[in-house]
């Protein structure tokens, strides 16, 4: 469990940096790209709307100017006298209708405001218009296009009136424009699905009917936003028509893109508007694409991050595992070396008292012999026991001495004489020295030396010591299991990884238990009976192989046999 | 034959001397290299048994000085610190043998006898060489005559 925690922290760190570091620039690019594209798309939409509105205004202005010019042409080509009868007027009206069917009626007024002649659907002859605002206006300016008003006929309409001065008398020609035709013309604007256009006057009252269903002469609820003097086309990117559709909460939210421009012929404001959703539908599509890219990109980053983090962690685990095993090997080797030095120190110190015991024993032995000779000791049995004890003292001192000698060998720090060794020649030399012993015990010794085996770097004497030790151990194990029949001892030599050579000594002896195999290279560890082995052989071998920059391993199965593997560095030059 | 044992282990000196004396050898002891060198000047020693690891000047240095001052005296090294390096060094500096403790006293006596025999052979050779010298130049003085006699 404890192992998990740092692992998790590391995983978190790696994962978060692998996600965040690419994610931040990625998102930045997405956002900046989106932002600038949005502005560009919006600008294009607005510009396109401005162009449409400008064209539309020109068309409406042209319409109004043409109608005015029509009337001016009539008034310039006719005198008051030729037009002050309804019959004459009817003829002119019909001519006028061939030019434009927008004219609803035609009327002639004298300077007192009396409707002298009229042709049209209403009965307006004889009415006096002296106090009507349009009349006052035309008398003053000469030409007048009126706002939409109800007038005597009580129906929304607007008129174009022109004054002519003739022999000190003024008269006025007036025509009504078909509200329906004008409405249709103004309203016929092609901007997306929700685009519409209408006109409001200086007071903000509708002069034409918006498609979205308001009545003429009603005030425009949004008039305060855009009813202001300006040149050219002005746009508003967000106009909300609160109260436009009361009781329709969905519509209330509709945000509009609005473009306005003042007409040239008449101080009317042409308003064109489109629901923003519609106007910027291209933008929305773009937004979806960007969103999709962002999502897919992020998903890819996260996926790669998870994937790579997993692999990275696995690598780190592998490497730290290797490191840990190397470290434990190193600690093991260091501990062995320290132990060896310490043991050597002890051995030296023990040798001195052993020598004293030896001397004392020799002295006692001598005195005893003297006393025996002089017949000072007569008890035969006691004498024999004493002599036996004396022999034991020699044997036990000998035993101690052999241990200290082994320890000294183990702790010895002689520099190995490193040279190139040709194992093709060297291995048979050593197996030769044990062949007699093996033969007696019925052990078949097999050598398998790979032809490709290069020379190894090592000390011949030390390597001999190691191999003999392994062979002797193997022979003991075989003897314990098979007696003098059926033993097999195999030495195989072959090139191994990392420019090394592997020497495997395999026996079919008793094998080593798992419990013992862990301690097999430790000094003083032995399974032999007391006095039969010092338990230093393999630890000495281990130390030697380490000293030769090699490694030593063991694998064994109880009842199957044991394989000791020694790996030594291969020589750089020379092939075996 | 006179034997000198140099060792810092007093008890070893004591019991070995006693034993060897009982066996009929003339034995001197010294508990340090310096004392041993003093004794060598005073007494006519044939074989020295020398410990390697001792306080003071130590066995190897003692060996060097003995061999410098008394080249014909045989020195047997006897040590608990038996390493190949020490042995090679000691033999190089003129020790006649290198024994590792513990060693049986009889074996030790055997080595001493061998060394003593070698010394006798060497002395005889020297004497013979001198006799030839004397025959050729009967008038010349024999500067090492005194010492040669004392060595016996």
Image (cartoon, coloured by chain):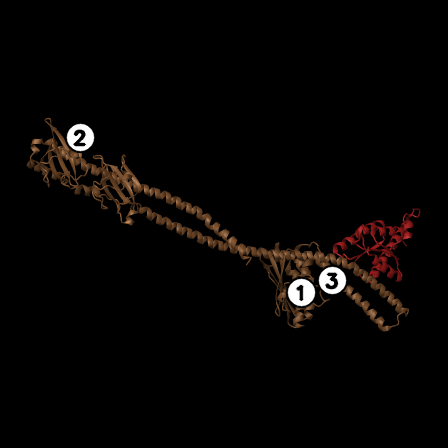
Chain colours: A brown, B red
Name the residue carrying label 2.
Answer: A141
Q: Secondary structure at mark 1?
A: helix
Q: Secondary structure at mark 2?
A: helix
Circles 3 and 1: CB distance less than 8 Å? no
Name the residue carrying label 1.
Answer: A471
Going from N to C along the chain, the mark reached first, 2 or 3, is 2
The chain letter for the residue carrying disc 1 is A
Q: Is residue A433 above or below residue A245?
A: below
Name the residue carrying label 3.
Answer: A403
**Do the dots labelled 3 and 1 sit on one chain?**
yes
Q: State which mark lies toward you, 3 or 1.
A: 3
Left or right of residue A331: residue A39? left
Q: Residue furthest right?
A: B139
Q: Position of residue A215 (x, y in %)?
A: 21, 44
Q: Is residue B134 above or below residue B105?
A: above
Question: What residue lies at 6% left-to-right and 37% top-to-bottom?
Answer: A87
- Quarter holding the C terminus of chain A? bottom right
Q: In 3D space, how far apart are the residues under numbered discs 3 and 1 (Cα atoms)?
A: 21 Å
Category of crowding for the residue at label 2, using alpha-carbon neighbours closer than 10 angstroms: few (below 14), some (14–19), many (at least 20): few
The chain letter for the residue carrying disc 3 is A
In depth, the one of A259 and A308 nearer the eye is A259
Work out whether residue A456 can be spotted. Answer: no
Q: Position of residue B24 (x, y in %)?
A: 89, 61
Q: In 3D space, how far apart are the residues under numbered discs 2 and 3 (Cα atoms)?
A: 139 Å
Q: Position of residue A509 (x, y in %)?
A: 64, 69
- Quarter holding the N terminus of chain A? bottom right
Q: In 3D space, how far apart are the residues under numbered discs 1 and 2 (Cα atoms)?
A: 134 Å
Circles 2 and 3: CB distance less than 8 Å? no
């Amino acid at each position: 469990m404890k192992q998990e925690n740092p692992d998790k922290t590391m995983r978190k760190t790696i994962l978060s940096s692998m996600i965040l570091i690419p994610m931040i620039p990625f998102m930045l690019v997405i956002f900046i790209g989106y932002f600038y594209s949005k502005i560009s798309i919006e600008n294009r939409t607005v510009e396109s709307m401005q162009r449409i509105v400008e064209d539309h205004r020109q068309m409406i202005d042209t319409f109004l100017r043409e109608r005015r010019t029509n009337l001016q042409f009539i008034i310039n080509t006719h005198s008051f006298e030729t037009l002050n009868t309804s019959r004459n007027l009817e003829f002119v009206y019909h001519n006028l209708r061939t030019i434009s069917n927008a004219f609803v009626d035609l009327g002639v007024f004298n300077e007192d405001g009396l409707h002298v002649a009229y042709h049209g659907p209403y009965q307006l002859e004889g009415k006096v218009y002296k106090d009507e605002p349009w009349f006052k206006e035309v008398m003053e300016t000469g030409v007048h296009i009126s706002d939409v008003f109800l007038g005597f006929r009580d129906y929304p309409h607007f008129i174009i009136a022109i004054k002519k001065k003739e022999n000190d008398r003024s008269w006025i020609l007036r025509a009504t424009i078909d509200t329906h035709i004008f409405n249709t013309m103004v309203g016929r604007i092609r901007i997306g699905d929700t685009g519409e256009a209408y006109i409001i006057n200086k007071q903000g009252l509708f002069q034409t009917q918006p498609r979205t269903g308001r009545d003429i002469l009603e005030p425009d609820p949004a008039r305060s936003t855009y009813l202001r003097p300006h040149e050219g086309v002005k746009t508003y990117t967000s106009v909300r028509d609160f109260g436009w559709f009361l009781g329709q909460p969905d519509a209330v939210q509709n945000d509009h893109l609005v473009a306005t421009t003042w007409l040239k012929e008449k101080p009317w404001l042409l308003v064109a508007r489109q629901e923003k959703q519609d106007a910027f539908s291209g933008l929305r599509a773009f937004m979806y694409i960007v969103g999709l890219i962002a999502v897919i990109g992020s998903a890819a980053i996260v996926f790669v991050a998870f994937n790579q983090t997993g692999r990275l962690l696995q690598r780190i685990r592998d490497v730290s595992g290797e490191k840990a095993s190397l470290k434990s090997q190193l600690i093991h080797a260091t501990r062995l070396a320290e132990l060896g030095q310490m043991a050597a120190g002890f051995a030296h110190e023990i040798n001195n008292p052993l020598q004293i015991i030896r001397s004392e024993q020799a002295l006692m032995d001598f005195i005893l012999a003297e006393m025996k000779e002089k017949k000072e000791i007569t008890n035969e049995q006691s004498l024999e026991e004493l002599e036996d004890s004396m022999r034991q003292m020699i044997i036990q001192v000998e035993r101690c001495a052999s241990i200290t000698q082994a320890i000294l060998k183990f702790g010895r720090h002689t520099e190995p004489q490193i040279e190139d060794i040709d194992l093709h020649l060297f291995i048979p030399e050593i197996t030769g020295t044990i062949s007699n012993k093996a033969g007696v015990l019925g052990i078949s010794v097999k050598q398998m030396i790979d032809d490709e085996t290069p020379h190894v770097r090592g000390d011949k004497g030390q390597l001999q010591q190691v191999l003999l030790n392994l062979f002797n151990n193997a022979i003991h194990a075989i003897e314990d299991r098979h007696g003098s029949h059926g033993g097999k001892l195999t030495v195989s030599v072959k090139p191994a990884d990392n420019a090394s050579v592997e020497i495997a000594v395999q026996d079919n002896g008793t094998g080593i238990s798992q419990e013992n195999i862990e301690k097999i290279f430790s000094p003083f560890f032995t399974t032999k009976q007391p006095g039969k082995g010092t338990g230093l052989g393999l630890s000495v071998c281990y130390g030697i192989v380490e000293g030769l920059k090699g490694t030593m391993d063991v694998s064994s199965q109880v009842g199957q046999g044991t394989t000791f593997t020694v790996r030594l560095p291969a020589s750089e030059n020379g092939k075996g | 034959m006179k034997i000198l044992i140099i060792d810092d282990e007093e008890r070893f000196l004591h019991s070995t001397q006693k034993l060897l004396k009982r066996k009929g050898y003339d034995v001197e002891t010294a508990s340090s290299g310096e004392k041993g060198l003093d004794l060598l000047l005073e007494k006519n020693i044939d074989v020295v048994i020398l410990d390697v690891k001792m306080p003071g000047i130590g066995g190897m240095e003692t060996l060097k000085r003995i061999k410098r001052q008394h080249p014909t005296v045989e020195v047997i090294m006897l040590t608990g610190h038996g390493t190949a390096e020490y042995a090679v060094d000691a033999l190089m500096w003129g020790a006649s043998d290198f024994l590792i403790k513990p060693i049986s006293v009889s074996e030790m006596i055997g080595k001493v006898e061998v060394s003593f025999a070698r010394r006798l052979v060497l002395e005889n050779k020297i004497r013979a060489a001198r006799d030839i010298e004397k025959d050729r130049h009967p008038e010349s003085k024999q500067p090492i005559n005194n010492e040669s006699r004392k060595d016996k």
